[in-house]
Image (cartoon, helix red, strand yellow):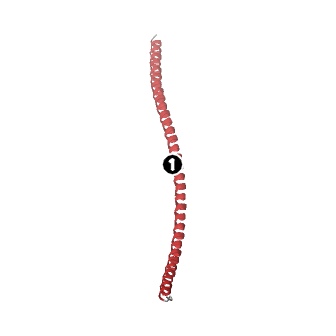
């Protein structure tokens, strides 16, 4: 009988140990599930951040390409303006030379006209 009582006490202690282990196991399982949920939320946030960063990167790339295109256009316009400036300076030089010749011709014409008035037979 004593052996049976000891076996019964031992079985109860074992059952209590098993219940305690089950309870701790469930607590640990709940903790792990909570951690998993937290990690999944963080992963989702990270994926959202990654998507946002990739969108921003794509926008930046488009902006860089647009600015590069505008810079190239600006460089072409500057080159064209420089060429026009050179041409205009050449035109101005030619006009100044023509103007100088015209002024000399006008002076000569006026002198001839004055001389013709002076030496005109009356």
| Nearer to the camera, 95 or 34 | 95
Q: Residue furthest front?
A: 122
x, y percent for residue 102: 51, 78
Estimate the x, y position of residue 81 in percent, counting from the top left. Answer: 52, 64
Against 46, is 76 above or below? below
Picture residue at 52% right of the left edge, 63% below the top: 78
| 1 vs 80, nearest the viewer | 80
Tell which of 26 and 121 is nearer to you.
121
Residue, far top: 1
In the rendered view, tell whether residue 47 sits above or below residue 3.
below
Near mark 1 (Cα within 10 A), the count class, few <14, some 14-19 or many ≥20, is few
User: Which residue is pictured at 45% across the width and 25% down the height?
Assistant: 27
Q: Which residue is mark 1?
A: 60
Q: Residue at x 52, y 40 (%)?
A: 51
For label 1, the SS is: helix
User: Residue 60: x, y in percent?
Assistant: 51, 48
Question: Where 97 falls versus 82 (above or below)?
Answer: below
Front one among 92 and 119: 119
Please state the horizontal and vertical placement of residue 32, each as a whole percent of the image.
48, 30
């Amino acid at each position: 009988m004593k052996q049976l009582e000891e076996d019964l006490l031992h079985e109860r202690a074992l059952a209590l140990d098993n219940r305690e282990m089950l309870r701790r196991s469930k607590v640990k399982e709940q903790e792990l599930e909570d951690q998993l949920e937290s990690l999944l939320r963080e992963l989702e946030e990270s994926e959202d951040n990654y998507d946002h960063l990739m969108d921003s990167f794509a926008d930046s790339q488009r902006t860089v390409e647009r600015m590069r295109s505008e810079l190239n256009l600006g460089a072409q316009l500057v080159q064209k303006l420089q060429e026009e400036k050179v041409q205009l300076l050449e035109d101005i030089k030619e006009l100044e030379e023509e103007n100088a010749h015209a002024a000399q011709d006008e002076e000569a014409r006026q002198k001839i006209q004055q001389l013709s008035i002076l030496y005109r037979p009356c």
